[in-house]
Amino acid sequence: MKILKTIVGILIVLSTFITSLSYAQAPVRELKDYSTEELVKHFATQYQVSPDLMTKIIRCESQFNPSAVGDHNKSFGLVQIHLPSHPEVTKEQAFSPVYAVEFLAKELSKQNGKIWTCYRLMTKSHR
């Protein structure tokens, strides 16, 4: 009986160890690996803004193209960040989907959607 209890104890310890190894090896996804849709959901939740509105702005501004360039080479990325108006933002940041989607969510949370032409056009039609 004592041997059986010892074997069961060893099996429980091994089972726990093997389970912890499988969790430890599970890859953790970084934000850079998220799709645009996942980034929108993530940052909309974080900044408590509408994911639908974010999606509509991105569709209108860039057609979901993270390499989009507009406004005579002055606006860049998914959300078309206008660099002359935002000197604190680099071109590399504007082209980063993570940065751009978070930038959009932050600005919307500050009630600053008017910096996007598409936002102004969408809200104008709802007045």
Image: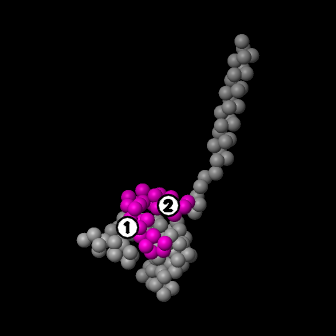
- Quadrant of res 118: bottom left
Q: Amino acid at mark 1?
A: Leu
Spot occupied by residue 18 in the image (x, y as percentages of width and height): 69, 36
Residue 1 visible in the current orientation = yes
Residue located 59% across and 60% down the image: 33
Q: How would you rate the neighbour count of disc 2 (Cα within 10 Å): few for under 14, some for 14-19, many for 20 or more?
A: few
| Quadrant the C terminus occupies | bottom left
Spot occupied by residue 17 in the image (x, y as percentages of width and height): 68, 35
Between marks 1 and 2, how big is the CA–CA gap?
17 Å
Q: Taking 67 as reference, is 81 left or right?
A: left
Q: Earlier in the sequence, mark 1 or mark 2?
A: 2
Q: How would you rate the neighbour count of disc 1 (Cα within 10 Å): few for under 14, some for 14-19, many for 20 or more?
A: many
Q: Which residue is mark 1?
A: 108
- Point out the stretch of residues depicted in magenta: 34-63
Q: Nearer the viewer, residue 51 or 9?
A: 51
Principal SS element in the magenta part?
helix
Residue located 64% across and 47% down the image: 26
Q: Which residue is mark 2?
A: 37
Q: Residue furthest top?
A: 1
Look at the numbered disc 1 and give the secondary structure of its residue.
Answer: helix
**Placement of 7 over or under 38, stated as above or below:** above
Look at the numbered disc 2 and give the secondary structure of its residue.
Answer: helix
Spot occupied by residue 87 in the image (x, y as percentages of width and height): 46, 81
